[in-house]
Amino acid sequence: MKPKTFYLFISFFCCASWGWLLGFEHFRQHSSPVGVTLCPIKAVTGYPCPSCGTTRSVHTFFEGHISEALWVNPLGIVAGLLLAIVPLWLLHDVLMRRATLHKFFIAFEQWFKRPYVYIPFFIFIVLNWIWNLYKNL
């Protein structure tokens, strides 16, 4: 992916992610979300997907309740850290006219293609899914 396309995509993704998180906060404060799910997998099957609860986990993480965020969904910690770091890194690259985020992404992508990296990641996702099923999220 070319740097310009990458930065446009990341900018859109950051805006959409923060919009989703802020919309979730508004929805949480102004409605009773009992029984409401936005996950298409859970809506169709009745079972949570591996990422179910990530929005709640990120929200809880940003409120400073790390252990609760881990309990809801450990992926929320990763997502929360990315939501905090990536926009700042993006802004840095734009202001300094550099492409360090893009270079990091390319290097990370190459590193992630190695079996000793993606296999434990896959196992973590499966274990997280089992955790979500166990909690009846």
Image (spheres, rainbow, N blue to C red):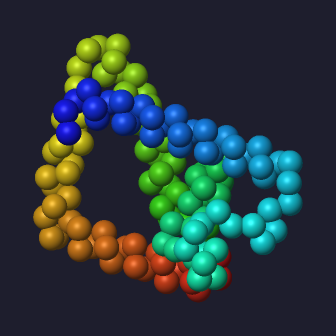
From what the image shows, is residue 11 above or below residue 16? above
Residue at x-position 49% and y-position 83%: 130
Residue 35 placement, left or right of 135? right
**Corner quadrant of residue 111:** bottom left
Give percent across and percent down for residue 55: 60, 56
Residue 59 placement, left or right of 128? right
Residue 108 placement, left or right of 132? left
Give percent across and percent down for residue 133: 57, 83
Depth order, front residue of 56/66:
56
Quadrant in which the C terminus is drawn: bottom right
Residue at x-position 65% and y-position 58%: 56
Total number of numbered discs in the rendering: 0
Quadrant in which the N terminus is drawn: top left
From what the image shows, is residue 109 above or below residue 22? below
Residue at x-position 81% and y-position 68%: 34
- Residue 84 visible in the snapshot: no
Depth order, front residue of 85/42:
42
- Residue 120 visible in the snapshot: yes
Residue 81 placement, left or right of 121? right
Give percent across and percent down for residue 39: 59, 66
Residue at x-position 21% and y-position 66%: 117
**Corner quadrant of residue 3:** top left
From what the image shows, is residue 38 above or below residue 95? below
Give percent across and percent down for residue 86: 40, 36
